[in-house]
Image: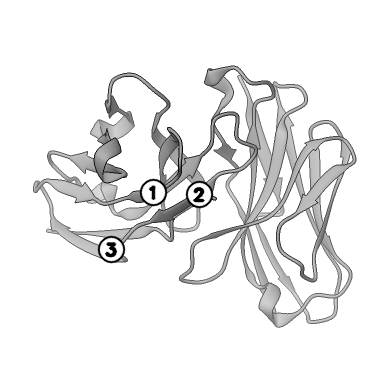
Amino acid sequence: AQSVTQPDIHITVSEGASLELRCNYSYGATPYLFWYVQSPGQGLQLLLKYFSGDTLVQGIKGFEAEFKRSQSSFNLRKPSVHWSDAAEYFCAVGARGFQKLVFGTGTRLLVSP
Amino acid sequence: SQTIHQWPATLVQPVGSPLSLECTVEGTSNPNLYWYRQAAGRGLQLLFYSVGIGQISSEVPQNLSASRPQDRQFILSSKKLLLSDSGFYLCAWRPAGLHISGNTIYFGEGSWLTVV
């Protein structure tokens, strides 16, 4: 069975600073990996996804994530955070041809001035 | 392009009253459909998913039920709400088929349910 761990419940970053949100997964084969963002009171928006190929994937809003098989990780990064990035971020994993995704518990990002 | 609609956006219901949340998807056929719940301060919990009309899989035994009366319509119901049913409910969909480009779940805007 798949599982996802997001070890940081909250992270505070200064505006303009770099960001890295951690995600570790457990799955026996090559997974499908996703990052979603949720603004307060809204649904989840897909930031990026990894299926295969290049392990560094680019997403919307200037985000990127790197798949590291040896570490079972799929960390999300952004070189310079904007105040509008304050939100909750969810990592998710699915098997190939999945019917459902397994989500992490989320990391809430706070951006300080 | 595909869109997902979910309503009502906000609902305040007394304990013991019924519930009906509705979700429809446009611009696609035979999608997988999902209902998730977020309780305050918690992550996403998958409640139900459906791969076709009348086919419902329940993930968590509870006070809720789901139905799919039409291909692109997914309804979440309860006969008698409990206080613990309060939360943020999200409908989602996934394109049909096994093509790699379809392997993504897209979410609606959610419905806030407060049971009082």
Quarter of the image with the N terminus of chain B is top right
Circle 1 packing at 10 Å, graded few (<14), some (14-19), many (20+), is many
Disc 2 and disc 3 on one polypeptide chain: yes
Q: Which residue bears the numbered disc 3?
A: A8
**Residue A34 to residue B14: above or below:** above
Which residue is under mark 1? A25
Callout 1: SS: strand
Numbered disc 3: secondary structure: loop
Within 10 Å of disc 2 (Cα), the crowding (few <14, some 14-19, many 20+) is some
- Name the residue rendered at 50%, 57% in the picture: A41
Q: Amino acid at mark 2?
A: Gln
The chain that hosts pointer 3 is A
The kind of residue tagged 3 is: Asp
Q: Around disc 3, counting alpha carbons within 10 Å, would you say few (fewer than 14), some (14 to 19), or many (20 or more)?
A: some
> What numbered label is drawn on residue A2?
2
Apparent side of residue B25 relative to residue A1 in the rendered image (left or right): right
Evaluate whether label 1 is on the same chain as label 2. Answer: yes
CA distance for labels 1 and 2 = 7 Å
Q: Amino acid at mark 1?
A: Tyr
Q: Nearer the viewer, mark 3 or mark 1?
A: 1
Q: In this view, which residue lies farthest toward the front?
A: A28
Residue at point 45%, 35% (across, down) = A31
